[in-house]
Amino acid sequence: MNLQVRAYLQGPYEASTDLMQDDLRAKGLLPLHQPYRQAPFLYQGNETLNRSLTSVSVGGDEEALIDWLLLELRSASNPTLVLAQKAVGLQADGDLMDVQTGSTTLAFLNLSAGAYYVSLRHRNHLGVVSASALGLSFTSSLIDFSDPLFTVAGQHSRYLYKTKALLWAGDLSQDKKIIAHGSGSDNTLLISTVLSASANTAFNTSYRLNGYAATDLNLDGETLAVGPDNDSRLIYSNILSYPANTSFAGNYILRGNGY
């Protein structure tokens, strides 16, 4: 069974170019092996990145690699039941690709044609699931999560910016919630990660933690708690701008679709 999928992450998205920035690729930080083995994902696939696919940059090509995503097909009768998973690459223009071939046609060879819920998960953005089971076959069809008119489960499940629908940034603990203050705060986890970095001997909150990390919400290769372009701002701005947070409460909990 074949399908094509398109999605945008809010963190690395640049409105001026209408593309996602490829800082992780440019800095050589993208892992060669799929990063979803640990909880809560527990995906044990063996996908390995073809190194040649990391040579493409955003400046010259919209196919530049941004990060890994986890693509799931779920039961038509029970959308919480995952039937198949695949770790895939995300390109700057939103297309998902096979990490070995670079093809944007993604194959699930062990599934028969039929209706499936389609789900996307990322290591520090809220995931999304199609609102209904979609008919899939060996004739490739496009599932476009970046289209605001494409319906997904839950209310306000994507961040809407002009003609784009993007996955919300900020769920760095992957508990399907974005929390700025209080128990389970993603911002507290971000700050504690910066302060506990082994090289941050002065316990400086403005310390720049380099590397591929869930706390790097804008995917620029750095975790920054305070200062220009810090990652905490995404958590706060999303909480305050969330459509259902009509009172602009700082302790509001932004919840994912629940699947």
Image (cartoon, rainbow, N blue to C red):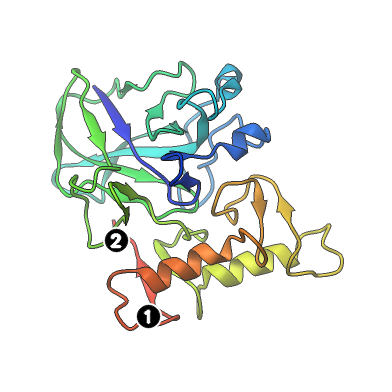
Answer few, some or many: residues within 10 Å of disc 1's Cα (few below 14, many 20 plus, some between 14 and 19).
Answer: few
- Which x, y percent locates residue 101? 46, 16
Which mark, residue 248? 1
Real-space Cα separation, disc 1 to disc 2, in angstroms: 23 Å
Number of numbered callouts drawn: 2
> What secondary structure is found at the residue carrying circle 2?
loop
Q: Which numbered mark, 1 or 2, is in the foreground of this view?
A: 1
Q: Is residue 199 left or right of residue 251?
A: right
Instruction: Report the residue at 49% width, 49% height from top.
Output: 123
Of the 4 image quadrants, the one containing the N terminus is: top left
Which mark, residue 173? none
- Residue furthest to the right in view is 201
Contact, CB < 8 Å: mark 1 with mark 2? no
- Residue assigned mark 2: 258
Q: Is residue 192 left or right of residue 254?
A: right
Disc 2 residue type (three-letter): Gly
Front-most of residues 241 and 190:
241
- Which x, y percent locates residue 87? 44, 33
- In this rendering, the answer to whether 170 lies above or below 89 is below
Quarter of image, res 110: top left
Front-most of residues 142 and 135:
142
Instruction: Report the residue at 76% width, 60% height from top.
Output: 197
